[in-house]
Amino acid sequence: MNVRPLLLLVLSLPAPYFLEQHVMSEGTGQMSEGTGQRRGSKKRSTERRRPSAPGRSSQDDDFYVTANMIQTALPAIDYEVLVCDQEVITRSLTKINRIYEESGLTQERANESALAAWKEVRLNSPLRIDQCMNSSSFINFTLTLGRIVFKSTPGEADITINGKALPDKTTHNMLYESGTHTVRYSKDGYETVEKPCTVLERKENDCYAELKPKP
């Protein structure tokens, strides 16, 4: 079952079902009770700051890179919201890591899935840019992700998944929501192949297509 409709439903629920009932207080960096929007009368700094990576200090940390990608795609998002997201991810990783370990997967894979889930939630869900994620909903969504590996003969085929073109050609892999997805392979001089590919959560899933030359 494709979980995207479930994700959209969960993310669109009113507080307190999805939204954390706290916000970052301007000027203090501390959590305060609220309605999912920032409040405070103190003057905000005009400097764009980014959250630090959880448990790491390297500037090229994967968390920093993901935060930068989100800020690039959503220039209006405030750094306090990303810091709040960071705290949610940090709290959630303990449970995510444990479940991944029980599934025979590494902590690195768990961290990668958490960041992929964060990017998906921020860029492709109804969650407003002034709202912080909810820990339990974030954990549940992260655990639905699986890795899909695109392969084709011949290689270097263009790929779309559920109508969305991917920037890379085969062989390519990415984390994606569990469920059955429509994948299309195309290459100049070859007939296009469209097929369903199933993604199982926390598994590596091959999606292979053999393209025949055009007559």
Image: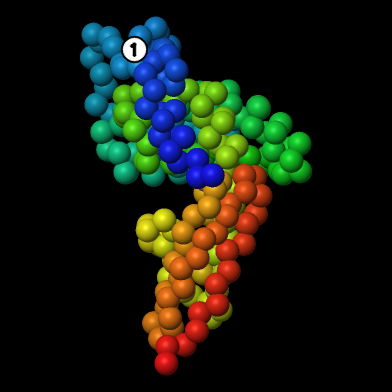
Q: Return the residue at label 1.
A: 35
| Residue occupying the point 64% across, 32% down | 96
> Which colour style is shown?
rainbow
Which quadrant holds the N terminus?
Answer: top right
Q: How many marks?
A: 1
The answer to whether residue 171 is left or right of residue 35 is right
- Nearer to me, 133 or 160: 160
In which quarter of the view is residue 112 placed? top right
The answer to whether residue 57 is left or right of residue 105 is left
- How many residues crowd mark 1 within 10 Å: few (<14), some (14–19), many (20+)? some
Extreme residue in the bottom direction: 215
Residue 185 lies, with reference to residue 47, above or below; the image says: below
Residue 45 lies, with reference to residue 108, above or below; the image says: above
| Residue occupying the point 39% across, 23% down | 13
Instruction: Give the amino acid at mark 1.
Output: Thr
Residue 131 lies, with reference to residue 28, above or below; the image says: below
In which quarter of the view is residue 123 placed? top left
Give residue 56's position: percent from left, percent from top.
58, 34
Which quadrant holds the C terminus?
Answer: bottom left
Give residue 46's position: percent from left, percent from top.
24, 26
**Helix or strand or loop: what does disc 1 sit on?**
loop
Residue 15 lies, with reference to residue 2, above or below; the image says: above
Give residue 87's position: percent from left, percent from top.
51, 23
Give residue 178's position: percent from left, percent from top.
56, 46
Q: Is residue 172 visible?
A: no
The answer to whether residue 47 is left or right of residue 10 is left
| Residue occupying the point 61% across, 30% down | 93
Q: Is residue 137 visible?
A: yes
In which quarter of the view is residue 82 placed? top left
| Residue occupying the point 43% across, 83% down | 190
